[in-house]
Image (cartoon, rainbow, N blue to C red):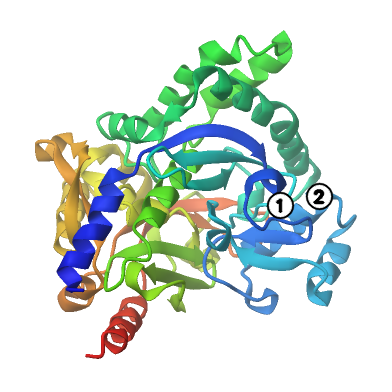
């Protein structure tokens, strides 16, 4: 098949996806292949000996949360003996921010493409501070995770059942018109999420104190909607995967050591190179010397045409990641040069509602020398310290060069 025709098919599938949040359930009940001895993590595959500090800390915390280990030493021994297995979230139709660690009993969002019935999953967002996704596993971190599992998750599940699900494609479109870009800035989207759930949460039978805590979670957590949005982007890009001859990128992900991409027409192969350290603004007392290389599955947002690709919609984000509002607009305009089309559903007000640049083409990346832009949080290289800043990063060009070479070989060119 002609590459351009294949890419049009992939783009049509992206534009045609209809992601909706349809539930919350324990990972073991819904994620394909999930087992008690399986720990899912962000990014491409990585072995324990190469795992970054935040990822190691999150895996330890996940094992403590599951009760599979009682101490840090026991958790490490389990992994080193091979008694538990590590696998990328992306291998199981899932995504997770930062370390992305998801374990069997954790509640996860269930997002369904209403057109195809395909599903994707993401864990619940812990909010700010010292959290598991940054490698923290102290008692208060585990206590909050248990509250989310026992109270928050079931309450949201019941609310979604009353609502008949929530149209995430519409929510993303709205948040882009309200100053969000859908990756690092989700203030408007999280407010919309909480507002839509609130009337139904009030009717699911929660005791007053529990209801207050759940509503406060949504009031205080500007990242609450990030995880279901990531799952929406995942199910959207999965729809475009597997088109023979297509050079569209369907996955970008990082594990804190490596950055990896997958391409629609190249099967499940990862194209991997060392992850870069983001450039940005640091919280007081921290600098680039403290930073871990880029980490997380949240680049699925840029893969789907939001995040840094929609920075023009979110000029205020530059106060968090650095730069100027004009540079935010320029970042979006640059991304039209490496994509195969635009998403008219995600109109950008500062660009007269032009659709977001969508469908990264590995050929255009290599030809122009422009790699995709990514907005990201910056993690400390030691587990448990948490977020130390935010900024911008680009994937290594080597990932795209490898993919172009593989495509040329696959097509016999």
Query: Which of 399/34 is in front?
Result: 34
- Name the residue rendered at 57%, 39% in the picture: 109
Quadrant of the frame with the N terminus: bottom left
Is residue 355 something one can see in this rendering? yes
Precedes in sequence: disc 1 or disc 2: 2
- Name the residue rendered at 41%, 63% in the picture: 252
- Name the residue rendered at 63%, 77% in the picture: 50
**Mark 2 element type:** helix
Q: Is residue 91 above or below residue 183?
A: below
Whole-percent x, y for residue 191 in the image: 43, 24
Whole-percent x, y for residue 68 in the image: 86, 56
Query: Which of 9/225 is in front?
Result: 9
Q: Name the residue under label 1.
A: 103
Marks 1 and 2 in Cβ contact (< 8 Å):
yes
Residues packed near mark 2 inside 10 Å, few (<14), some (14 to 19) or many (20 plus) = some
- Name the residue rendered at 48%, 61% in the picture: 287
Whole-percent x, y for residue 238 in the image: 41, 56
Calculate the distance from the C-alpha at mark 1 to the C-alpha at mark 2: 7 Å
Whole-percent x, y for residue 243 in the image: 32, 66
Q: Which mark identifies residue 188?
A: none
Q: In this view, does 128 lie to the left or right of 206?
A: left
Q: Name the residue under label 2.
A: 66
């Amino acid at each position: 098949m002609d590459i351009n025709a294949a890419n049009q098919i992939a783009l049509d599938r992206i534009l045609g996806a209809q992601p909706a949040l349809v539930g919350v359930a324990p990972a073991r009940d819904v994620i394909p292949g999930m087992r008690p001895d399986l720990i899912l993590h962000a990014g491409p595959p990585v072995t324990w000996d190469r795992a970054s500090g935040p990822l190691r800390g999150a895996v330890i915390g996940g094992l403590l949360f599951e009760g599979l280990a009682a101490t840090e030493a026991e958790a490490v021994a389990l992994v080193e003996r091979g008694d538990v297995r590590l696998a990328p979230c992306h291998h199981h139709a899932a995504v997770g921010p930062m370390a992305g660690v998801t374990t069997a009993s954790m509640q996860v969002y269930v997002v369904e493409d209403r057109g195809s019935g395909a599903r994707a999953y993401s864990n619940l967002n812990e909010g700010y501070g010292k959290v598991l996704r940054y490698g923290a596993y102290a008692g208060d971190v585990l206590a909050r995770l248990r509250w989310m599992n026992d109270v928050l998750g079931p309450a949201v599940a019941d609310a979604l059942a009353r609502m008949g699900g929530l149209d995430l494609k519409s929510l993303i479109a709205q948040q882009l018109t309200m100053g969000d870009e859908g990756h690092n800035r989700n203030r408007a989207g999280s407010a919309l999420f909480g507002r839509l759930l609130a009337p139904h949460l009030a009717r699911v039978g929660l005791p007053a104190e529990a209801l207050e805590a759940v509503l406060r979670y949504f009031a205080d957590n500007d990242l609450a909607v990030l995880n279901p949005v990531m799952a929406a982007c995942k199910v959207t890009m999965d729809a475009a995967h597997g088109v023979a001859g297509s050079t569209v990128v369907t996955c970008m992900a990082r594990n804190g050591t490596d950055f990896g991409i997958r391409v629609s027409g190249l099967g499940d192969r990862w194209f991997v190179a060392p992850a870069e350290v983001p450039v940005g603004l640091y919280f007081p007392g921290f600098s680039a010397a403290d930073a871990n290389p880029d980490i997380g599955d949240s680049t699925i947002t840029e893969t789907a045409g939001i995040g840094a690709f929609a920075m023009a919609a979110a000029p205020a984000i530059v106060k968090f990641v650095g730069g100027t509002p004009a540079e935010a607009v320029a970042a979006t305009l640059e991304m039209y040069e490496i994509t195969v089309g635009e998403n008219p559903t995600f109109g950008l007000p500062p660009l007269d509602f032009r659709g977001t640049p969508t469908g990264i083409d590995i050929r255009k990346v290599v030809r122009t020398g422009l790699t995709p832009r990514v907005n990201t949080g910056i993690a400390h290289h030691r587990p448990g310290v948490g977020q130390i800043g935010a900024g911008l990063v680009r994937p290594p060009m080597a990932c795209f060069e490898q993919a172009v070479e593989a495509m040329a070989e696959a097509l016999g060119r």
